[in-house]
Amino acid sequence: MSDVTRADGRALDELRPVTIERGWSEHAEGSALISFGKTRVLCTASFTPGVPRWLTGQGKGWVTAEYAMLPRATNERSNRESVKGKVGGRTHEISRLIGRSLRSVVDMRALGENTIQLDCDVLQADGGTRTASITGAYVALVESIAWAKQQGHIPASAKVLTDSLAAISVGIIDGTPMLDLPYEEDSRAGTDMNVVATGSGAFVEVQGTAEGKPFDRAELDQLLDLALVGTRRLAELQRESLAGVEA
Amino acid sequence: MSDVTRADGRALDELRPVTIERGWSEHAEGSALISFGKTRVLCTASFTPGVPRWLTGQGKGWVTAEYAMLPRATNERSNRESVKGKVGGRTHEISRLIGRSLRSVVDMRALGENTIQLDCDVLQADGGTRTASITGAYVALVESIAWAKQQGHIPASAKVLTDSLAAISVGIIDGTPMLDLPYEEDSRAGTDMNVVATGSGAFVEVQGTAEGKPFDRAELDQLLDLALVGTRRLAELQRESLAGVEA
Amino acid sequence: MSDVTRADGRALDELRPVTIERGWSEHAEGSALISFGKTRVLCTASFTPGVPRWLTGQGKGWVTAEYAMLPRATNERSNRESVKGKVGGRTHEISRLIGRSLRSVVDMRALGENTIQLDCDVLQADGGTRTASITGAYVALVESIAWAKQQGHIPASAKVLTDSLAAISVGIIDGTPMLDLPYEEDSRAGTDMNVVATGSGAFVEVQGTAEGKPFDRAELDQLLDLALVGTRRLAELQRESLAGVEA
Amino acid sequence: MSDVTRADGRALDELRPVTIERGWSEHAEGSALISFGKTRVLCTASFTPGVPRWLTGQGKGWVTAEYAMLPRATNERSNRESVKGKVGGRTHEISRLIGRSLRSVVDMRALGENTIQLDCDVLQADGGTRTASITGAYVALVESIAWAKQQGHIPASAKVLTDSLAAISVGIIDGTPMLDLPYEEDSRAGTDMNVVATGSGAFVEVQGTAEGKPFDRAELDQLLDLALVGTRRLAELQRESLAGVEA
Amino acid sequence: MSDVTRADGRALDELRPVTIERGWSEHAEGSALISFGKTRVLCTASFTPGVPRWLTGQGKGWVTAEYAMLPRATNERSNRESVKGKVGGRTHEISRLIGRSLRSVVDMRALGENTIQLDCDVLQADGGTRTASITGAYVALVESIAWAKQQGHIPASAKVLTDSLAAISVGIIDGTPMLDLPYEEDSRAGTDMNVVATGSGAFVEVQGTAEGKPFDRAELDQLLDLALVGTRRLAELQRESLAGVEA
Amino acid sequence: MSDVTRADGRALDELRPVTIERGWSEHAEGSALISFGKTRVLCTASFTPGVPRWLTGQGKGWVTAEYAMLPRATNERSNRESVKGKVGGRTHEISRLIGRSLRSVVDMRALGENTIQLDCDVLQADGGTRTASITGAYVALVESIAWAKQQGHIPASAKVLTDSLAAISVGIIDGTPMLDLPYEEDSRAGTDMNVVATGSGAFVEVQGTAEGKPFDRAELDQLLDLALVGTRRLAELQRESLAGVEA
């Protein structure tokens, strides 16, 4: 890595301070309040026996997600989507990404005819809200599966999860690839990439976007390397947070 | 007071543990994370120079509020109002109550042509979410006014606030009036009242509802007495939380 | 009472002229066109055997209400909520108040698994539209219950109603408490209160709001006294209007 | 005409009893409560100086209309369009018809840069609600123009109206053409036609629909003859109602 | 006919070039891409066994239609109705017209408990989009019925269609009646009429509107004559397009 | 490449037949009807002088896009988003992707304060609708810029486009990477990737998703290679289609 200095003094391949407060909610079957630096997301998992109608009777479960931001999570207040009467494109897109990503590590047959709804609500935003959401939602998901096993909704022996899952952003700023961008860096990035990867290092989602000039294969490769450094570290933190949870 | 025992061991005229974490948000001009027992509400105040078009040029400011609940703030997940595409009646009603209450202690001329938008987002609900919202929003409001004075948007000498403001619920359960009802008590209450009062003990809103049998004048009087015990105590806690803030 | 003169020459504790035209509608099972002075509200009760799904099989009925204003009921035309695509906060709040109030005098077991939907449409508004709505809706409700007994949907012996119900507004204008405020007085009131009470004089809803300066206990007491003068008189008028109706 | 008997004993070319209560509203600049038999529509005209943005500066006025039904205007209650969050196709279509029809008799240059908004709210429906709406809206329109002349918004000499306007339904039931169909006849009509005509007998709208089997030229001719009998009679009734109004 | 010259050189009673590309869609059970001059509409028929709930068990089918325009079908781009969140009045009205017209030539008992949904999407608009839609939708409808017979959803012997159906616009421009108006003529027409007629020359819908001055009986008669010239010619073109289709 | 046979007989790195009908629309400033096999998308570019308010006065232009599907573009009819009253998540996401991608090859300063709105309407869908949309929208965009230069809205010398742009899908089916997936292959793909690339072979968007099991670095590399084969070929076809267009 180069010797470029980041505003917060981090190394180019270093995550911001990450905290995961598992079991934050008194009500939800699973929950985690996760922070990537100043970004804070409350993730809850709601477990319900039964599946949506279109899936009934197939012996398979369902996992879905919704993402949202509090109006003053950001530096400028944005209007509530409930008041506007519609969910914006960005919200939709991130909700779909979170749900799809989590489903990739769930064995729906092992889950049985049960539904887990993840909610990721951004209480404070400073870049990386979608990656923090995925990383935290995975923890809430695990907790809710453990709960469901304790309650007998899922057999204790069922292997519902096929791997762990985490996500991180990477980007190229002034020609330099960097890991885990806060808002200030993200808004200056020429290329911006979100990577969702399993604990064993395989890719689930790779979404790279040229905000400025298009990127070449070499840059893409560097970004992928960097991202896997991040998701590997997040997988460790998730493991620590979930110590003792039997899912 | 009688010797009825409450599930959580409190006296009939005792508040649940109240905590106020002022300055919770990195972005908002004012903020407070307030808890009444397990009820937790994040209140932010967004200060913007200027007023809505219908008020322009009158030398007066504006204060408004929006209330919402996270989908899994409650024991059963409720659908997001943004996804449903409309704000429910209860949400509307509470938003209007919060805004109206706060305006009653603001001198709009002293505020000048500035707008303060309060957002009260319930992260976890266990009864009393509207009263916690008003009580916390007042703290965020004060902090935002102090900020505006520091920034020069409002003259330091302006007396924007005419009094402090807090709110509490009271109710009659099995014939016994009680202060600050958690969800379990609230759902059993025959009469339910929310009282918004100033620090000097005058009423700003009194909303009493017979959920079961209608109530008489004597019961009403008991409930009002009890409520003022609560709002007086909350006013002290607000004062402590705001120590050193010049608004 | 003091010797303050009101614009329309009324005594401070005097209602505006009240008329109740019961059975206005050819179609509805119950109906009343009620006037409080220039305020005119058409109230209909639609009786349907059966209850909403969430209530099925519990042997209990349901009563609900919707309130709305014609666009030119007021001095300035307001846009239709159907065209705006959403129901406003004020409309929601009043609809909820009407429904809740009426439910307080209905024995849902005696009603059986039947639904009564009240609709209160303000044809002309001059203050007190919510109180006229509740007072008129009660009359329509009674008429619809009588209809249902005649049709055999409810046993003739069932005691569905536990009391009668009426509502009135009171307020303090320039320091003087007054009964039944028209728009002109209402807009000048420092404190404004709506009281819903039973025929036997118990409270069902008390909603007091300080529009200007907060109010004290003595003022609150005066307003409640005045309100009960009004609801008592309305109960008589309802009784006259319902003479011969067996509900 | 044939000797077929109608349920209400009317001749085939006879209108139901028509009443027009002009000046019903205390607030609107023009208004009429019109009845065609049991069908009752409240029509108001709201006059506002100025025109919508797209018309500004062209020296021309604008006339538009909205139609709606109260939920229990009909025999079965229908859900409110405000609650459903959208205006239905039928409502849209009739609103457009009313506005277009009225514009055909208004000289927009003579009206000047002023807007008149007609609202036709069906309080009770028994067939012919759109034709009663147009006929009543014309009366409210005239009254509002007279008001605007008195207020000086329009010069007293301006000839804003080029003719009067009325509308009626006709239909073929069991092979017999009839005038002014109540609901019971309308629902049995094989062909159904609404005709909007000027006081001098010219057509503004002709909308004929085969509900059952398609209709031929001879039937069309009979229906048009019958309709003009109706609109001629309505024009007389409008004239009587507007006696003394200078528009 | 007079010797007025039209911008495109057509005779007054001449259609624009009409093309019907039947079977345009790979997916739909019936389809036609129809052009009236530059107006191009893609019509598809979607056949589904079963009927909407309100019709179940009556042994009858259902035919319905939706009309829409692509945003840049017109000379100026219009906003998408999906983005605006509501269907406009004109769209609603035309959708209803198309559905109602097609139902007039379908024997619902012969169709059996099956639903056919027509979609008419205007790819390019130059006047007459609703008449092209009806004319093209009829072709798609026939094709879908033939498909349903081949698939055994309807007995081959069933006589589902009672006649053919086509529609055309006529109008009076500068006093001259003309057939099939493109946008440029339509926008100048004083009277504008859409006529839907069967192959045997009976009327299904007649919708005449005075855009400028009201029209008299003689003008109405001329327009109807002209329209039938058009629908007769369209019926021939439909027949050619459907050669070999057994419906 | 392996010797796996595809259902349509194509080589693994072969595109479906691609046709681009430029200038399809009579009204739009730029347009192209593009086909990737049975997938057909009508792309229009609407050029408007001026920019949205938030961009005014910065000397820069704006390019945005909307994507939609006709209801019967697919094998099963889907409900219209206009009728549902909201735009779905998938539609939003693709609209955003198209707009973002096109902006990456536009020099907004060279475009000046002008707006280009792309509309991509899928007339028939068989996989790859988003990639066909981007590829076709680029052609429409170029045509609209040429138009704007001819009209003098943009100086003829301005270099508005920095490169050409095309997009293609790639996926892994039963372990074999393939180019340009029709619906049947897409629904069986374990990994699915959409790549947007410039004519010079740099990446603008890379969106890879594991539908089944997560993918490794080697697979990712193969997919990227294959995608560039496709976008290179599409760039040639675009060039041919745009021969003679001066943008």
Image: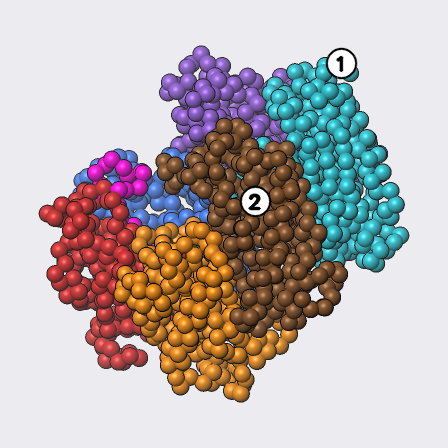
Chain colours: A purple, B blue, C red, D orange, E brown, F cyan
Query: At 78% from the left edge and 43% from the top edge, which residue is drawn?
Result: F22
* Residue D13 point in image, percent of width and height: 36, 69
Q: Give the Cα distance between marks 1 and 2.
A: 49 Å
Query: At 73% from the left edge and 56% from the top edge, which residue is drawn?
Result: F48
Residue A56, above or below B182? above
**What amino acid is found at the position of numbered circle 2 in the picture?**
Tyr
Quarter of the figure that contains the N terminus of chain D: bottom left
Q: For numbered disc 2, what is the local secondary structure?
A: helix
* Residue A245 point in image, percent of width and height: 46, 19
Q: Which residue is mark 2?
A: E138
Query: At 41% from the left edge and 15% from the top edge, which residue is drawn?
Result: A155
Query: At 25% from the left edge and 41% from the top edge, which residue is drawn?
Result: B188
Q: Closer to the observer: label 1 or label 2? A: 2
The residue marked by circle 1 belongs to what chain?
Answer: F
Q: Are marks 1 and 2 in contact (CB under 8 Å)?
A: no
* Residue E160 point in image, percent of width and height: 48, 39
**What amino acid is found at the position of numbered circle 1 in the picture?**
Ser
Stretch in magenta: C50-71
